[in-house]
Structure formats: structure tokens, C-alpha cells
Image (spheres, coloured by chain):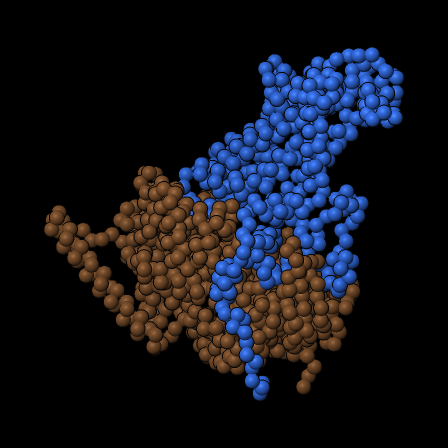
Chain colours: A brown, B blue
Amino acid sequence: MPAPVLSYKDIRVSFATEFGDVDAVKGVSFEVMPGEVVAVVGESGSGKSVTSSTAMGLLPESASVQGEVLLEGRNVLKMSTAELRRLRGSDISMVFQEPMTALNPVLRVSDQLVEALQVHEVAFGGKALEKSIELLERVGIPEARTKIRQYPHQFSGGQRQRIVIAMAIACGPKVIIADEPTTALDVTVQAEILDLLRELKQELNTGILLITHNMGVVADMADRVVVMLNGEVVETGPVAKILGHPEHPYTRRLLAAMPLLREAGDPSLEREQEQERVRVTERAARETSHRAAAGMSSGAASPAPAALEAKDVALEYKFRRKATRVVHDLNFTVQPGEIMGLVGESGSGKSTVAKAVLGLLDVAEGELRVRGENMPALPSKQKKALKREIGVVFQDPAASLDPRFPIGDIITEPMVVHKEGDKDSRMARARELLDAVRLPSSVLNRYPHELSGGQRQRISIARALTLNPTLLIADEPTSALDVSVQAAVLELFSELQQHYGFACLFVSHDLAVVDSLAHKVLVMQNGRTVEQGTTDQVLRHAKESYTQQLLAAAPVPNPETQARRRTERQRLLAALG
Amino acid sequence: MSQPTPPIPPEDVRSAAEVEDAKLASAQRSYSQGQLVRKRFFAHKPAVVSMAVLVFIILLSVSSIGFSGQGTGWWSKSFSATGLTVDGGRPTMFNAAFLGEHPFGQDSIGRDYFAMVMRGTQQSLLVALGVALSSTFLGVLVGALAGYFRGWIEAVLMRITDVVIVVPLLALAAVFGAYAQGLPGGTLTLALFIGLATWTGTARLVRAEILSLREKEYVAAAIAMGAHPARIILKHMLPNSIGVIVVNATFAIAAAILLETTLSYLGFGVQPPETSLGALIQDNQNAFTTRPWLFWFPGLFIIAIALSVNFIGDGLRDAIDPRQKRSGANRPGWRTAFGLLGRATAEERSGKQVSELSGGPTQMQPPAGMTDHGPDFGHDPTDEKRDS
């Protein structure tokens, strides 16, 4: 048995804070073998990043570390600053989450790669440049010889992450710590980066310590898994065992909380289709009776207006009087009580559509009808009145609530803006809504910073529902949350939707989340509609190749299924050329 | 693997959502942001001591000679009444008797210098406060309008700001000072007018702050619910930029005292028979070698006021703006605040093994308990994103 290349022995980390010491890691031990991928999974606050950072000596000043981190038998924690500096990059290197910030924007890529080589005295001058070009070619950057002269902003996010990986492997490290290397990337790019890491691992026999919260990525990459909770290891073992037959209840819950992209033939689908049929027929029946009632009184048959309707909508951003069109010819209808998932990768314009519906962006062309009225064209007073009908939930739980408002004021703000009710009735409504999102009414007087991300997101939902809107805009409402929190919020969301019956435009990049919620799906790419239809049609019987690619790239938390999907995806990509 | 897994306490296996809810229900005490700010401020020793010093100076100056300055307080002498020069005007406070007849001495025409310094302190503080008020009000107004509405409103307002900035501050202040002399209201009017020359810094800072707040989702949510711009600016944006505003106003006070000194020296500031700390120094500049106390006493008061106001500003910034906060072991002590002591590393202080700090863009997560649930909102993960 080979010696481990990196081993953590009884690591304890505590941070000195204003409110006393906080123990972030409480005695963690595990090992990474050469050529092995060890995935450390856990939710935020589990201490997974803090643990791994000890190997690089990258913790802030307020941290104190105990235990041993052995890199090929040498204790990293006992090293001097100079020794650590020699170590970093050459023996152990890191791939960060955000490729935007991991590269220096004012230096050419060549300078940054050459620097990495020269600092560790691997190669100098022209040789270093040659080696850099080789590295770029190795990580799959086309035309590396010319592109190496470019600046980081001239590359796409995925290419930037490839460059970061090239820097990480420049000096032939024994271990690579990859801290959420694909979290900031689109799902198709994520699949490519994971492929690259897998190839490199086999080629260089490097140990990879993969820190992630995504069980799908674990299934795709890892050999062994370490599950962490509140600074402790709860379970560790081979990937097939942890994901297939987890022993610890926490691991089981974590896996159960993962939203799943169901394949055709899944038994839960039939039940849902049945519900959907009931829903559609009920609506049709309601409409006919409504029409009949209207026909009796006025004689004119008018169909109930759609909650939201886009007709040939084009949207553009203006910068210095130059308009860049980001959404073209968008057409869709969201019926009352219906959830439409708007899916796409970054830059597809999906959030821009949400912005336009909220009135945060002018519509350049076409009509955007809310309950049958073209909102952008209305005079401001009517527009304000129509805004009562729209609620919104944003992505970032830290930024979507005003930090200086107590929760009660946040929830009742829409009533204050629309001058509805008095103080008592507003507070009564706030209590009612808190009850609906299952938070105690004692939080009325608390401030957003006292709540966790998931709780804040529930407050956001409560605020969106204050005026009983007919339409809710949800812009990636759960993508900043941990999986188990996300599961709780999604469950609550669909319950509330059934109870209040609002229509919803649900913007998301996560196909699995959309699958669990939406009745209809619209897939966007580069500002254009790729495909739209019912969830079943789009996600299980996709016609367009782009949708198929998207579906194939989403990893599932089962190593065997994921391996099968991976080969299927490669076959699909090969077929598409 | 063969041994049975030990029983796990139930709280370990609950999902994160439930743990958070349980924590919320069990939390005893909740702090508002105001309470947190107060707590932090009072933990900042230099600021608290400075506040005590400033309050003492204010009480001393007002209670000793009264608001009118005519000896209506516990010190019976008026600042403007001349008298016989005793002992060449030397201060008597160093003599055997406590304070004595003229503790700070007398000036060349026999006025009691203690009363004059007290009057000067009153006037200087009044100027400082007036300037801080008017410049902050104007700066916030211009900055908020420009930042919120953008477009031509911003273009016009910021070009006006640029014009005010390129005109030398002293020349502008002198013009306004000279104009204010013809108006009723005395020193306070002068102060409000000087503020017309010093609002530009605040305006730029507030505009920058408002620009970044515009991108916040809670502002977008308020716009989406149909809130009026005035409500968004007054209720959402200004309260959230209060840190910048208050801190800037504090530093404006310190700057205003010095500006008033300069103006008085040039003859555009406080006019005789009224006096101020700056005017006292100017009047007695020739006496520095022969009767240095005439220079030192007002000088010491200027230094004491400016220094304590600056420390209070530091304390407020640390307390209000958690992004710049130095907390826990990193909070500066007295010697550090004066630059007498480099920042000791945590290693030196605790003697524990600590890894080296790196400025690199680490994607580390904040430790448990500090991220989302604790009142320590300064360590919010989003803040890190913003900083990088």
C-alpha cells in the first residue's frame, strides 16, 4: 500500500471572534493517496474549506490550528513562512471557486503562468513561456500560442478555470486542493472541467482533494468521500458505499434532499401527470363557468387573461447610448396558478426577463402583458396599481432584505407602499404570513442578520405574498442555499403555491429544481428561446440538441448512473460534432 | 466498519433547516443594528475616552462663562472685559493657589485668557458643528439625487461638484465667510455658509454608496413593489449609508475647526470682539517666543478637540461599518491607535501555533456560527465577495 500524499491528523481549528472563540473544526482526520480523488462534502459551516486550507497555511490571523497536516511526511503546520512559500504551488496547489477573481485581471495570462514557473525555479524566460504554452494546450485552450498573450477577461469563465488549473499543475504538484472548482460554472462547462480534472489526475498521478457540496460532482469524480457536519467527520468511505448505502442518518438526509432530475419512466411522474391533468381540466371548467356567468350578465365572452404573457419581447441594456440586445423575440404565456420554469445558462438572458417583468428594465420591443394589460405602456399610476399583483423573490438571501428593517417592517412594506390597512391589520397580516412560512412570530422584531440564509429566503417569500399577488417572480430563489435548506424552501414554496394559487415565473439554472416544481419549462440560450413546453416534454423528451446537452451535463448523485450518463453525454457530443 | 455505528444524538442528524429554526426559537436576546453599533462603539476604548474628553471640554466651556460669555457661569470673568495685567500676564494655575486669579494668564490688554479660551472653544465648536451640519446635509442631498437618478441629473450635479472642487477651498470659504459677516446670526450663520464650500467630499462618497446600494436586491424589490423614489432613498438607501455619512461628518468637524482657524487668520472668519481658538492663535502669534502660553492654551484645545473627534470617528466607523471592522483580537489598543506599536500577530499574543495570513483570494468559508446565524453580520460571505 502506498504512503498517503496528504494526511490530516486530528485537526482542530478555532476562530477568535468578538463573541468569544468559535470552534470551526473539531478533530478531523483523513488521508489522500496519490492519484486518488477524495471528496469532502458538507453544507456551509461544516468546516470543509477551513480544514483543507490548513494544508496551505491560508487561514486568517484570527484562527488557531492544532493537530498535524502531513504532506509526504512533513508537517505543514510546523513550517516557517519561507518553507510554506516554497511548498505552495510546487508540492500542493489550489483551484479556486471563482475563476474571475483567481486570476489577476491586469496581467497577461502568459505573465501569470511564467511567474508560477519562475517562482518555483522550474523554468525561466523563453523556456518558461514554451512550457506555459504546453500547459495551456494540455488543459484544452485552443490556439494557445496566440491566446497566451491575452488578458483574463478575454477568456470565458470555463476557459479561465482551465487556466487556473494550468497554473495549479504547472509545477507538478503532489496534491491539488480544488475548493468548489465548478460551483461558479454552468452545468455544461462544469462537466468539461470535471472531465479535464479526471484526465489530469490519471496522467499526473496527483492526489485531488475536492471540496464540494454537490453530490452529483462527487459521484462523477470521487474515489473516496468524507462527509462533514459541524466541524466533524460523520462518515467516510468509498464513493459507491457512501452514495449507495449511506450509514449515517445525516448522509442519508443529505442525499434525500438533493433535487433529482427524473428520467422518463420514474414512478413519481405518473402521479404528477395525473395531478396535472386534473389541474388543467379544473381550470378549463372554471373558465367555461366563468365565461358562462359573464355571458349571462354582459353577453360578451371574454377568456380569463393570462397571469403573464410575453409577445415578441426584445430586451436591451443601454450603455453610453449604445444598446445591446440581450433577449430576442420572446413569446410565452403563464396561466393563472401555473409555474413556468425559465431555464438557461449564464448569459442566456433569463434573469433579464425577470427584471423586465418587475419593471426594473424597459422593454425595447413587444408587449409584456400582466393580467391582460401591457404593463410597460401603462401610465405610472396604473402601473403602480398593477405592481400589487406581482411579488418577487431574489437569489441572494443576504442582499434581498434591508438590513436596517426589522422583519415585521420588511413583510408589511408592500402594504405601506400601497397604503393598505392600518398598523394593526398590517401586523396581523405579517403574523399570518410568518405562520405560513413556518417561522415563529417572535421574529417580527428581529433583524435579517439574525436569520440564516434559508430563513431569510422564507421571509422574502412572505414579503412577496403580502398583497396576495397573482404572479410571483422567483429569480434563482434557492441557488444560494445548502441542499437540505433548499429542499425545505422548495417544499414550502410548492405548498404555498397550492394554497395561494399564484402563477409563477421561476428562473433557475438547475434543471432538477425546475423539474420538482414547474408545470411548464422554457429553455433559453443567448437570449433566444430554444424550446418550450410542459415539463415532461422538455425535460424528458427534449427535441433540441441544446436541451439534450443541458440535460446530459447535469450530474446525478449515483456513481454508476453518473458513469453511464457520462458516456452517453460524450456520445451525444460526438454525434453533434 | 464491522463494529456497529454508535448511537447519534438526535440533534446531530437534523437537517440544517431544522437546526437553524431550533436555534432561532432558542435564541434569547436579539440585538437591533443600533444596539450592536452601540455595543461595538463602547468596546472601542480610544473612542470612548475621546468622547469623555470632548464632553468634558464642551461642559467646561459652557458652564464656566455661560452661553453669553459674560461670566455668567462659575467663572466670573468676561472674555471681553479688560483689566490690570498681573505679573506680566503669566498663568497663575501653576502657582500655589488652586487656579488662581488668571489660570491661563492674561493677554496684552489684560483680558482673562481662561475666559477667552473658553469663549474661543465655544465658538470653534459652534463653527465645527454648523459646518458639519450644513455640509453633510448638502452633500447627502446632492449625492443621493445624483446616485439614484443617474442620467442628466447626475451629470449636472456632479459637474457642479467638480466646479466647487476645482475652486480653492480657502478662496471659496473666504468669499462665503465675508458674505456671512453681513448677515444676522453671527457665528452659526458663518458656519452654515462655510459648509457651502466643504460639501463636495460627502457628496461624492454618498453618491458612490448609493450607486452600490442601487444594485442591492432589496432596493430592486422596493422598486418592483412600486415604492416611490423618495421612500427608497429615505427609507432604504440613506439608513444603509449612515455609516459613511456619520463618519464623514465627524471628520468634517475636525477639518472645520482647522478651516475656521485659517479663515480667522486671514480675517474672514470670526470677527472681533467675538473670538475663536483660531483667532486667539492668530492674535498672539507674535507672542510665541515671549509669552508662549498665549499660543499653547488655545493650541492644546484645538489639538484635544480635533484628536478626540477623529478618534470618535474611528470608533464610529469600526462600529457602524462592519466591513472595515477590526474585531476581537485585532481591535487596536491605545498604543496601536497612536502608532506606537505595530499590530501584534495573533501568534505573538496567544502563543499558539498559527498559520500565516495570506492576502490571496481564498474561497474559504467563514467558520461555523459566524456565517449566517450569529449577530456577527460583518463576516457575511457576501461581504467577502464584495471585498474581492
Residue at the (72%, 35%) spot, across then down: B53
Q: How many marks?
A: 0
Q: In the picture shown, does residue B213 fall above or below B115?
A: below
Residue at the (79%, 26%) spot, across then down: B297
Residue B291 appears anywhere in the view: yes
The picture places residue A197, in percent across and down from the top left corner, at 58, 72
The picture places residue B107, in percent across and down from the top left corner, at 81, 17
* Quadrant of residue B169 within the rendered picture: top right
> Furthest-bottom residue in view?
B2
Residue A91 appears anywhere in the view: no
Q: In the picture shown, does residue A241 fall above or below A412?
A: below
Given residues A355 and A246, the one toward you in this image is: A246
Residue at the (63%, 15%) spot, across then down: B181
Q: In the drawing, does residue A284 fall left or right of residue A311?
A: left
The picture places residue B288, in percent across and down from the top left corner, at 84, 22
Given residues A238 and B31, the one toward you in this image is: B31
Given residues B266 and A445, the one toward you in this image is: A445
Q: In the picture shown, does residue A25 fall above or below B308?
A: below
Q: In the drawing, does residue B148 fall left or right of residue B250?
A: left
Q: In the picture shown, does residue A144 fall above or below A243?
A: above
Q: In the drawing, does residue A568 fall left or right of residue B47?
A: left
